[in-house]
Amino acid sequence: MIKLFEYLSLLIIPLFILFTVLYGTCKKVRVYDSFVAGAKEGPAIILKIFPYLLTIFVAIKGFQASGAFDILRDAFYSVFAFLDIPIEVVSMAIIKPLSGSASTALFTDIVQTTGADSMATHMSAVIMGSAETTFYVLAVYLGAVGIKKTRYLVPVCLVADFIGILVAVVVARWFF
Amino acid sequence: MICVSIVFAIFTGNLEAFTTSLFDGAKSAVEVSLYLLGIVSVWMGITRILEDSGLIYRIAHLFKPIICRLFKKIPGDHPSITAITLNVLANLFGLGNAATPLGIQAMQDLDSLNEDKGTITPEMMTFIVINTASIQLIPFSVIGILAGYGNSNPAAVVFPVLIATTISTLTALLVLAAFRRVFR
């Protein structure tokens, strides 16, 4: 069932591109020229996004390396001790919104050290699947259109992330 | 955030690691940008074909009833409806490579409706909140890692993830609505 679904989702993009090109050809669009003209816009967009991405990446890496991350994690761990969440999961909860590659590395590490069937693994798996790298999304999407005044967007995302991770922990405990 | 990190680095004696990490961060920003440059350009090319053939307006028309319920201020048949729809679909199927360029496209289309450039619109906020809450039917990469390390039933994670992601997306939209009411 999962395998079939995975195959289908691998099929979507090729089919979509095939359909687009065929449809364009039927409508007598010069497909090659259109594609090239569109692709030309790519570099300008990335140039706009780059400074935002750079700022976020440098800030996040520095935050992890300076030891501030560990202190934040320990603070969260002691505050939410009554929920009985493994400390690995607290790390995961903080890392997931910040960095995609770091959270994948951490998840692999949790699976290796606590075992593939442990509660920490299950909770982290649900967080991995149900949360997104919020700051990356913010940097890329806001950078693409040069938005500087974000009003109350960042607090909304942080509150939503926090609730999302609590939900993930509760759901994981309920199922496993 | 950088200032806080520097202060902590001085206190914890992690100064050397901190400096290295700054250059690491700069390096990965360049790597990610180059990667995005490729896929964004490809999708921009495909989008241009969609536009020139008029298909983009047909898709927009098809999904207008659903999308316009969440994004009230988008005029009918606007190209942003297509970009938003395709982005949401790509997210649902876990196609991150396609979701990001389509999301960038959607933001640009939404910005064309923006009267006060540089300031975010409510539609952009809704769109970003949906994207940061992550909506994914099946987390293939997680299942892959679980299976790789001998989890007894990797597919068992699908249902909990689906429930968690549905609840978190709904609460994210509720939180946004609550903030919107307070900061009107």
Image (cartoon, coloured by chain):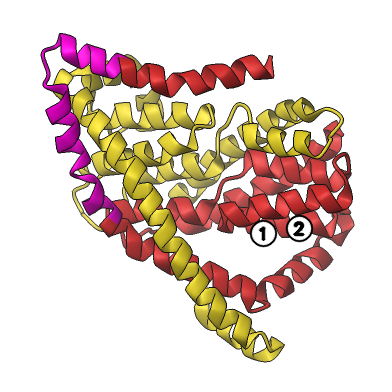
- Which residues are the magenta region? A19-46
| Vertical order, A73 against B78 (above or below) | below
Residue B165 image position (x, y, % from top left)? 63, 35
Asked whether A176 falls inside the magenta stretch, the response is: no
Closer to us: B167 or B136 = B136
Circle 2 packing at 10 Å, graded few (<14), some (14-19), many (20+), is many
Which residue matches tag 2? A90
Disc 1 from disc 2: Cα separation: 6 Å
Task: Give the letter of the yellow chain.
Answer: B
| Vertical order, A167 against A23 (above or below) | below
Q: What element carries label 2?
A: helix
Question: Which residue: 41% across, 24% down?
Answer: A13
* Mark sitting on residue A47: none
Report the side of A35 relative to B124 (left or right). left
Question: Which residue: 80% across, 57% down?
Answer: A88
* Mark sitting on residue A94: 1
Circle 1 packing at 10 Å, graded few (<14), some (14-19), many (20+), is some
Let me know if residue B184 appears in the view.
Answer: no
Q: Colour of chain A?
A: red
